[in-house]
């Protein structure tokens, strides 16, 4: 039985802890905050409840596998997990609206043809079919196996597997280099372009620089569906925490790790803010790149580029509304920005700082769960509005006037979908990237994106095995990147490397 110290109680770290405990190890989790879950939080007030992190789960098989491998109760026995249908609705800048059914290729084609025009559904379907090539090429090396430090292997992942259409003429070029080029060339209609690019934007990816392989994001959602946990997605974090507890994982809250203890080039424990050093045979860190550099500089090798140090963040407005939820309202609706260029410049433009990075109306995701557990009664509605924004630092999101002004822009965007919004409003609360930074420790409140092939490897994350022997990484800032499912995969990979050694190749 080895002693294993886990730094952080986020989803990836807890997934690793549960698997390591089942393997017979003694696992202790050190979390600087007062609770578990990391970015998967919950805010409650006056009988209303809101998720402060992800609002939906894609690829639920990741957590089904975790629960199967760590106990008798399945995911469905532990939680009420349901598919949402439609998977999403969209309101485009010209007023066109469409509802896309969950996990139905034919249904999506029909819906787009009816809303956008004949042939629109087929063009979208053909793009999704090409994205399947990306899925088949990258599923194993990016989602099922830990990342290798081999230069040839990394160079291969730097090539984009998206099979782009060829141009006609003597000088023909194949794969478009970035997602925006794919959208413009293959979809043509600005509404379909907005639909594709919104999947990238939701993960904090700039479609003008993200590789064409980012088309795999809508492929995964459309193929495997969108899922919700009754009572809110925080319930998934609670269930993973309880599974850890049943496996006798020990949690120490309010325990900030300030350094990974080292001896003879190996991690041998953790040093806490109170000066105590707890010994361990192995350490797993579920932390951001900046924290990792601070507590374990020897682990920050150059083998894999970790992506942007501070990715974009999330700006969220929680709405407590009087009046019942409209019958037939979609669980998730994306209200698209009227000015794509202004939004992308505000979110991603390094030259846009302060007010220049907030002077636009954003694309807003509106979550309206049909869930009695998140509202005081059926005469009220809990609604969450979310936009991808520049990180804290490029914008001073701690400034109350800045946050309040941008909240008004978010409310303006949602008002067309929620008629009489301000008249129905009992109260609202705002969460900014500055709040995320305080809650999770992630620099700038940035939320990491999933890994992608292509882009010369710039969209990979730090490998799970570090240059410091005995120290492993899990969570959204490690391979295979951000998102609930990807965080769970990272925990699987870190645990597999510890239990089975460096030769463990995941799915093999």
Image: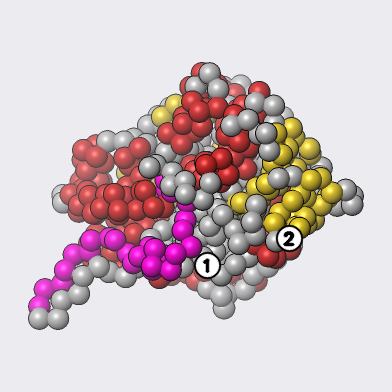
* Quarter of the figure with residue 437: bottom right
Q: Under tag 2, what secondary structure?
A: loop
Q: Residue furthest bottom?
A: 171
Q: Which residues are magenta?
A: 143-169
Measured from the top left, where is residue 41 in percent x and y? 65, 39
Label drawn at residue 346: none
Q: Is residue 303 visible?
A: yes
Q: Nearer the viewer, residue 404 or 83?
A: 83
Q: Is residue 312 above or below residue 481?
A: below
Q: Between residues 377 and 459, which one lies in front from this camera angle?
A: 459
Can residue 237 be seen at all in this image of the molecule? no
Pick the front one: 313 or 299 = 299
Q: Position of residue 25 (x, y in %)?
A: 66, 34
**Can you give x and y, in whole percent of width and height, for residue 150 in the image?**
44, 64
In which quadrant will I find the N terminus?
Answer: top right
| 216 shown above or below 354 | above
The quadrant holding residue 323 is: top right
- The residue under the point 41% across, 58% down is 452
Q: Residues within 10 Å of mark 1 (few under 14, many from 20)?
A: some
Q: Which mark is residue 303?
A: 1
The residue at which mark 2 appears reads as: 264
Residue ID at (54%, 60%): 462
């Amino acid at each position: 039985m080895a002693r294993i110290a886990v730094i952080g109680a986020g989803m990836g770290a807890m997934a690793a802890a549960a698997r390591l405990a089942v393997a017979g190890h003694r696992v202790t989790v050190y979390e600087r905050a007062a609770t578990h879950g990391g970015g998967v939080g919950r805010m409650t007030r006056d009988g209303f409840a809101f998720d402060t992190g992800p609002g939906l789960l894609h690829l639920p098989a990741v957590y089904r596998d975790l629960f199967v491998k760590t106990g008798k109760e399945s995911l469905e026995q532990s939680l009420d997990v349901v598919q949402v249908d439609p998977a999403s609705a969209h309101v485009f800048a010209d007023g066109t609206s469409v509802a896309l059914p969950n996990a139905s290729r034919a249904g999506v084609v029909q819906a787009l043809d009816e809303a956008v025009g004949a042939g629109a559904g087929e063009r979208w379907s053909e793009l999704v079919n090409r994205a399947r090539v990306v899925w088949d090429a990258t599923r194993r090396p990016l989602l099922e196996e830990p990342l290798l430090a081999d230069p040839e292997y990394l160079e291969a992942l730097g090539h984009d597997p998206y099979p782009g259409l060829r141009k006609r003429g003597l000088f023909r070029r194949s794969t478009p280099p970035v997602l925006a080029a794919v959208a413009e060339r293959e979809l043509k209609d600005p509404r379909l372009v907005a639909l594709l690019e919104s999947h990238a934007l939701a993960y904090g990816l700039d479609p003008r620089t993200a590789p064409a392989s980012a088309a795999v994001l809508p492929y995964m959602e459309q193929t495997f569906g969108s899922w919700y946990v009754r009572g809110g997605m925080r319930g998934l974090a609670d269930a993973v925490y309880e599974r850890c507890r049943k496996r006798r994982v020990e949690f120490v809250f309010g325990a900030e790790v300030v350094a990974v203890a080292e001896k003879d080039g190996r991690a041998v424990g953790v040093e806490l803010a109170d000066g105590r050093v707890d010994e361990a045979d192995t350490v797993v860190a579920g932390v951001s790149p900046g924290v990792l550099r601070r507590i374990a500089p020897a682990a920050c090798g150059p083998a894999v580029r970790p992506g942007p140090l501070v990715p974009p963040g999330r700006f969220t407005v929680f709405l407590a509304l009087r009046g019942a939820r409209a019958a037939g309202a979609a669980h998730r609706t994306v209200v698209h920005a009227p000015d794509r260029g202004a939004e992308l410049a505000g979110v991603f433009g390094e030259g846009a700082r302060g007010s220049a990075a907030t002077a636009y109306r954003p694309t807003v995701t509106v979550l309206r769960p049909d869930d009695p557990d998140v509202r005081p009664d059926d005469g009220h509605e809990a609604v969450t509005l979310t936009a991808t924004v520049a990180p804290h630092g490029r914008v001073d999101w701690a400034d109350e006037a800045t946050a309040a002004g941008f909240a008004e822009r978010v409310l303006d965007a949602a008002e067309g979908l929620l008629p009489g919004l301000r008249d129905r409003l009992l109260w609202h609360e705002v969460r900014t990237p500055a709040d995320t930074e305080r809650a999770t420790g992630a620099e700038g409140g940035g939320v990491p994106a999933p890994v992608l092939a292509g882009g010369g490897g710039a969209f990979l994350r730090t490998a799970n095995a570090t240059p410091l022997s005995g120290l492993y990484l899990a969570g959204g800032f490690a391979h295979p990147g951000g998102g609930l499912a990807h965080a769970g995969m990272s925990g699987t990979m870190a645990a597999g490397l510890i239990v089975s050694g460096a030769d463990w190749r995941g799915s093999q």
